[in-house]
Amino acid sequence: MYGDLTVSVLAKGMQGLSRRLESTSRNIANANTPAYARRKVSFEEELREVVNGPSKLPMAVTSRTHIPSGPLSVGEVIPAETRVPDEPYRLDGNAVDPEREMAVLTETRMSYSALSRFLARKGAMLRYVIGGN
């Protein structure tokens, strides 16, 4: 499985979704904290650009000291957690909408479960090809 793009993408997706679960859980835990700005985790667009190719012309990286315009491989995609400060939900400045957070939590759990099942089936296929049962 070493060097398999599918396994790398699935593992990176599960890592990003795990980070999103943590962030969303933190948002729900702080639903009553005044002036709390909710956080969100994004990684799908960067992962999509690595797999499908960049949508914009990438800058050439000819030296290790150059800063690339985006991730060059699946391993370089880092799930980024950002604050969303300009969406106050309540009068005390709290930006957490519990219903939205629960929807994000449910969607993330379902996606994580689907990736987990897909990865398990990929492993079962490889075991079968190798000669296992």
Image (cartoon, rainbow, N blue to C red):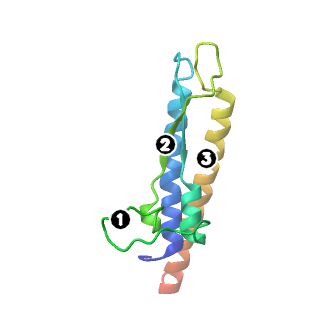
Alpha carbon distance from label 3 to label 2: 15 Å
* Label drawn at residue 108: 3
In the figure, 51 relative to 80: above or below? below
In the figure, 28 relative to 11: above or below? above
Viewer-nearest of discs 1 and 3: 1
* Label drawn at residue 66: 1
Amino acid tagged 3? Thr
Alpha carbon distance from label 1 to label 3: 35 Å
Where residue 130 appears, as percent x and y from the top left, is 47, 85
- Under circle 1, the secondary element is loop
Location of residue 84 by image quarter: top right
At 48% from the left and 51% from the top, the residue drawn is 79
Amino acid tagged 1? His
Q: Which residue is mark 2?
A: 81
At 48% from the left and 42% from the top, the residue drawn is 81
Amino acid tagged 2? Glu
